[in-house]
Amino acid sequence: MKFSNFFSPTLKNIPAEAEIISHQLMIRAGMIKQASAGIYSWLPIGLRVLKNIENIVRDEQNKAGAVELLMPTIQSADLWIKSGRYNDYGKEMLRINDRSKREMLYGPTNEELITDIFQSYITSYKDLPKNLYHIQWKFRDEVRPRFGVMRGREFLMKDNYSFDLSEEDAKISYDNMFTAYIKTFLRLGLTPIALRAETGPIGGNLSHEFQILAKTGESTLYYDKELEKVNTKKIDPQKLQSYYATVDDLFDENECPIPKEQLNISRGIEVGHIFYFGTKYSKKLGAYVQNNKGKNIPVHMGSYGIGVSRLVGAMIEAFHDEKGIKWPLSVAPFHIVIINLMMNDEKCEKLSLELYNKLKKESLEVLYDDRDYSIGRKLSDNELIGIPYQVIIGKRDLKNNLVELKNRFNNESKKISPDEVLNILLDRVKSIL
Ligand code: 5CA
């Protein structure tokens, strides 16, 4: 992609409405534009990152044995009236009337719809267990949308729903998702802490939140210090769940089972939340299967959510410096940016295009910054956007057959020959594809 043909509007000044760094950087780097309170357009750079994160989340779900489908954003109120949540959900639910005055809603979550799909087709224990998911936009009319995509009104969520014959089996599904969540967040380069949590409007009595440590997080976490040291290479969900770790709503100083010296209190961003709620929805919506004795029993269910669009903000909170964003290669909008500092120099232009074409041929995502802007503007824009590898081509160095290769993630840079640059990039970037 040539930058001159691309659309990536950067801003120099910090937007007044953005309180936290990730929100500021997302606006300044041209990732999102607010359409109305808590509702955003995703501009090209933002969309690329969102899709990359979505694909990692999807890949880990598929590896864990979950099966993808797609349910609509707009739902009929009927199933929600049956489950009893149409009134319970209150003002957070966006209610709409269609032209025939039928009551519709923009889905804040999908327990009802998926349970209805399940009960339409599955009637025997022989078809269990099942774990179905989708990645779809949700709408919650939050009282206080804030921090950009962190607490939006419209946001992208990955949500799955598990169906099992018994509580015992359902706990196996729960632990399987617990493990998949830890793997997903580690793969994104984040450090997740899993904590016991409130179940709220989803229901049930077993639930864990997955939080990323960040000073700007909205939740306060109370957890055993040991949790940060647990070896996550071999994830043991039972062991991780055995440590004391809880969110503020459930914390009681007088009932805390571990000594004060062992307790860490930190702020965090909730990036995932899992629930086991037994037969709450299956009984109301008729999701029964025949067991091996021919008896009809309601299935045991769990639901599991990851805030995909929230993760974009959470990752920026984790990966930035004073100049801008530092994307890990795995989710970066492009792998490499070639920055030609001298657009009117024939040699700079020739080499830039040559490298651009060679790297593109190897299926790498390359941006060629061919804009007719000042050197300062081009360099600062690229620091802000945070593409992990910068190849900086200038007239003076090129006389000595040198170009600069900068790693934006650790800010190390060196001047080497164009051939060496090519070898290094092919080696490093290809190894992660
Ligand atoms: N049905 C369940 C699990 S699928 C559910 O809806 N869980 S939830 O309410 O906890 O949401 C799941 C995840 O979506 C949260 O952990 C959070 O990361 C994300 N999320 C929730 N509300 C918002 C919001 N307003 N803006 C951005 N992300 C959100």
Image (tube, rainbow, N blue to C red):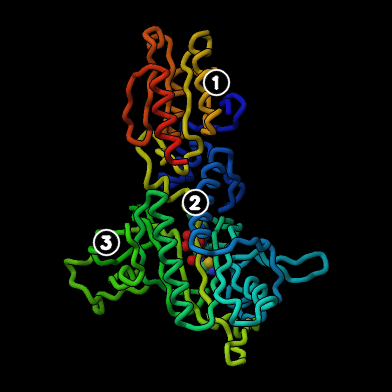
Q: Residue type at mark 1?
A: Arg
Q: Earlier in the sequence, mark 2 or mark 3?
A: 2
Q: Secondary structure at mark 3?
A: loop
Hey, which quadrant is residue 376 in on the image? top left
Q: CA distance from mark 1 to mark 3?
A: 48 Å
**Residue placed most toward the observer, 215 or 58:** 58
Q: Residue type at mark 3?
A: Val
Find residue 216 and report its horizontal and vertical position in percent: 37, 53
Find residue 321 and report its horizontal and vertical position in percent: 35, 38
Q: Nearer the viewer, mark 1 or mark 2?
A: 2
Q: Earlier in the sequence, mark 1 or mark 2?
A: 2
**Residue of label 1:** 371
Packing grade of label 2 (10 A; few <14, some 14-19, many >=20) is some
Q: CA distance from mark 2 to mark 3?
A: 23 Å
| Residue at image coords 57%, 88% | 292
Q: CA distance from mark 1 to mark 2?
A: 32 Å
**Residue of label 2:** 56
Question: Image check: 334 left or right of 257?
Answer: right
Marks 2 & 3, CB-CB < 8 Å contact: no
Compared to 296, does 130 lie above or below? above
| Residue at image coords 48%, 57% | 60
